[in-house]
Image: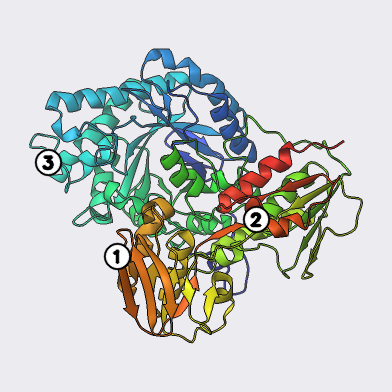
């Protein structure tokens, strides 16, 4: 489903139903927008509720979110991914957060979400299948006691996390559940842990205390559960007293569906929630790449769900709710890159951030004030780093002029939008175009610069970008070797066979682009990082499938040494030489390095200057945006 589908035959918008109230059990929610549970890592290692958590959620509540689902650990060891409700001493720590969110009219549900119990993933040491029957009963009681503590803390309800491979999800799985007792075997037995959990929570907390079940509508593993069987589980949960179903998808072996990448369409699970709505009497919540408010509105208007849930969209922009009903609102739209919120978070064990929004996760630390009103700033370069610096400085009140030799803003990030499924990356550039124009930033585009333009500048920001890294390769005279930029500039690709030199992030995306144009592709490089590390689990899953279908050949841990008309030579990591015969077009996709000479041309003695982005050092889009943001925020004026 895309945003254009919200328009009818006469071009009129459907009625805006996102802002209408609806109920989950006894609780009325002021609109249909729910923020789903996220592992933000904003708690500390003791599971304490922190100012970082409070500031993050308050920003979204102030914008008008209807309900939040916030995870808390009901038992076991505490970890940073979520706060703790593991014992009664943890109840009071939640009250300041809940009081603030309630003051904005939001409702808050606690997702009962145990730390470290996600069998099949790193860090899990216990399988629910190894527990005794009494052990399962103890687990059910622990969840129920966690729900009771949530009620005492002031939560409006709870959500049982039965999706994505956690202990409840594993027990629900007829495929994976190997138990031989009353908690395994038949569908009814596999669902018993949930039905007994719901009943016990209602017994402890009262029949009017809402309980949501989150479930993977499809497990999306070979032989895994389909939506039809999931509906049967939901009917059993409904009979036990559940008040709403929250449908998602995926298990540990199909993690790509938990946070799907940009090539997956917006609202891609709405058909599942629609199916469940036709089978159930309780409300249904749907999640899954809901970015544009018009897509969310259509899902509700069409009766496919009662509520829409989102996570990454409100990470990208805490003011998402303010975009509803506005066609030109300057919104940072989630591009599903998974870089800051998932890949870097997991690889570097850091807090949850966002590639395009440096304020995400920093709401407790950063306030941008009007402390530089009237200061004149020249920004040389309209790529991501230059735009990010201009964004911060214009918020501080500076008068900004941006210069770039190209006729459009965005720099190399425009190229990043060209591989399969990445057209939405242009939304990042569109955001900057809107907000900077609103702040009266002046653009001077399409005219090459060799030095800083004349002006009484208080600050010059050099954001000229990097230059192509060109490895040492013997290239026969007259051979045409393309840069990535020249490749993407071609209106027509004449050659049928291509060699992509470089297997970093740029190399993989160029190979993907060419293969989907019907070209035979060989990629050769020696980047030590594997593609999962480079691209993330979800993105690599779908790209790998495209590579396999298109027959892309990858020579890893190898260096191209020579290029000629009859083929190329390479050396592998063991020093062995190889030769591949053929008539190929070659693309150098080895990334970028700082262009020190270009930078020096914009440096002037006595002139305060910031060098940002790839003009300073090589990095990716997140490095460019965040690095420039931090420098522009920290710079002082006389």
Left or right, 358 with respect to 351, comes to right
Residue furthest out toward the top: 89
- Determine crowd level at label 1: few under 14, some 14-19, many 20+ residues with C-alpha closer than 10 A: few
Q: Position of residue 612 (x, y in %)?
A: 68, 49
Q: Is residue 239 visible from the viewing direction of this image?
A: no
Which one is nearer the viewer's eye here, 564 or 424?
A: 564
Residue identifier under label 2? 384
Q: Secondary structure at mark 2?
A: helix
Residue shown at 79% from the left, 64% from the top: 450
Residue identifier under label 3? 178
- Determine crowd level at label 3: few under 14, some 14-19, many 20+ residues with C-alpha closer than 10 A: some
Left or right, 61 with respect to 401, comes to left
Q: Secondary structure at mark 1?
A: loop
Residue shown at 83% from the left, 54% from the top: 440
Which one is nearer the viewer's eye here, 628 or 502?
A: 502
The quarter of the picture where the C terminus appears is: top right
Res 3 → quadrant:
bottom right
Res 314 → quadrant:
top right
Question: Alpha-carbon distance for marks 1 and 2?
Answer: 41 Å
Q: Earlier in the sequence, mark 1 or mark 2?
A: 2
Left or right, 333 with respect to 431, comes to left
Q: Earlier in the sequence, mark 2 or mark 3?
A: 3
Q: Marks 2 and 3: CB-CB under 8 Å?
A: no
Question: Marks 3 and 1: which is nearer the front?
Answer: 1
């Amino acid at each position: 489903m895309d945003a254009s589908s919200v328009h009818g035959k006469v071009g009129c918008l459907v009625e805006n139903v996102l802002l209408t109230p609806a109920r989950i059990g006894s609780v009325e929610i002021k609109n249909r927008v729910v923020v789903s549970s996220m592992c933000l890592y904003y708690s500390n290692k003791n599971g304490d509720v922190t100012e970082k958590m409070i500031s993050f959620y308050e920003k979204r509540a102030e914008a008008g979110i209807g309900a939040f689902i916030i995870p808390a650990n009901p038992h076991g060891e505490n970890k940073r991914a979520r706060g703790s409700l593991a014992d009664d001493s943890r109840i009071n720590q939640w009250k300041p957060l809940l009081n603030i969110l309630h003051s904005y009219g939001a409702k808050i549900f606690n997702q009962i979400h145990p730390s470290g119990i996600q069998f099949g993933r790193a860090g899990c040491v216990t399988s629910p299948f190894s527990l005794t029957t009494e052990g399962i009963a103890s687990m059910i009681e622990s969840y129920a006691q966690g729900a009771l503590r949530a009620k005492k803390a002031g939560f409006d309800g709870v959500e049982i996390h039965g999706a994505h491979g956690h202990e409840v999800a594993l027990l629900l799985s007829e495929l994976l559940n190997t138990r031989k007792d009353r908690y395994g075997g038949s569908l009814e037995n596999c669902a018993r842990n949930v039905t007994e959990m719901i009943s016990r929570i209602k017994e402890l907390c009262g029949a009017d205390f809402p309980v949501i079940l989150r479930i993977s509508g499809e497990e999306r593993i070979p032989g895994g559960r389909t939506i039809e069987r999931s509906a049967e589980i939901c009917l059993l949960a409904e009979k036990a007293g559940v008040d709403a179903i929250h449908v998602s998808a995926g298990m540990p072996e199909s993690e790509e569906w938990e946070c799907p990448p940009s090539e997956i369409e917006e609202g891609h699970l709405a058909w599942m929630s629609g199916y469940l709505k036709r089978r159930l009497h309780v409300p249904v919540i749907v999640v899954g790449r809901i970015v544009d408010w018009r897509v969310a509105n259509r899902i509700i208007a069409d009766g496919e769900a009662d509520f829409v849930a989102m996570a990454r969209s409100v990470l990208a922009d805490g003011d998402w709710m303010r975009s509803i009903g506005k066609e030109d609102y300057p919104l940072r739209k989630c591009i599903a890159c998974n870089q800051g919120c998932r890949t870097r978070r997991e690889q570097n064990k850091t807090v949850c951030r966002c590639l395009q929004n440096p304020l995400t996760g920093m709401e407790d630390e950063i306030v941008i004030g009007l402390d530089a009103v009237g200061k004149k700033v020249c920004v040389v370069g309209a790529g991501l780093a230059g735009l990010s610096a201009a964004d911060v400085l214009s918020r501080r009140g500076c008068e900004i002029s941006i210069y770039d030799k190209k006729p459009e803003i965005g720099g190399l990030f425009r190229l990043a939008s060209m591989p399969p499924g990445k057209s939405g990356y242009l939304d990042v550039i569109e955001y900057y175009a809107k907000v900077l124009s609103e702040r009266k930033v002046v653009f001077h585009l399409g005219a090459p610069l060799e030095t800083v333009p004349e002006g009484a500048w208080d600050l010059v920001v050099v954001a000229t970008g990097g230059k192509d890294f060109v490895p040492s390769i013997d290239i026969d005279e007259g051979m045409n070797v393309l840069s990535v930029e020249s490749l993407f500039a071609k209106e027509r690709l004449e050659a049928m066979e291509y060699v992509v030199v470089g297997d970093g992030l740029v190399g993989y995306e160029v190979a993907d682009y060419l293969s989907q144009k019907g070209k035979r592709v060989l990629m050769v490089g020696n980047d030590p990082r594997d593609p999962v590390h480079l691209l993330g689990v979800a993105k690599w899953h779908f790209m790998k499938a495209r590579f396999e279908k298109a027959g892309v050949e990858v020579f890893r841990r190898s260096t191209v040494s020579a290029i000629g008309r009859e083929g190329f030579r390479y050396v592998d990591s063991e020093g062995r030489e190889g030769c591949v015969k053929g008539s190929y077009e070659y693309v150098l996709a080895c990334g970028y390095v700082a262009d020190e000479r270009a930078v020096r041309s914009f440096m002037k003695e006595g002139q305060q200057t910031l060098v940002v982005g790839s003009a300073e050092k090589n990095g990716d889009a997140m490095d460019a945006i965040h690095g420039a943001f931090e420098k522009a925020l920290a710079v002082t004026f006389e």
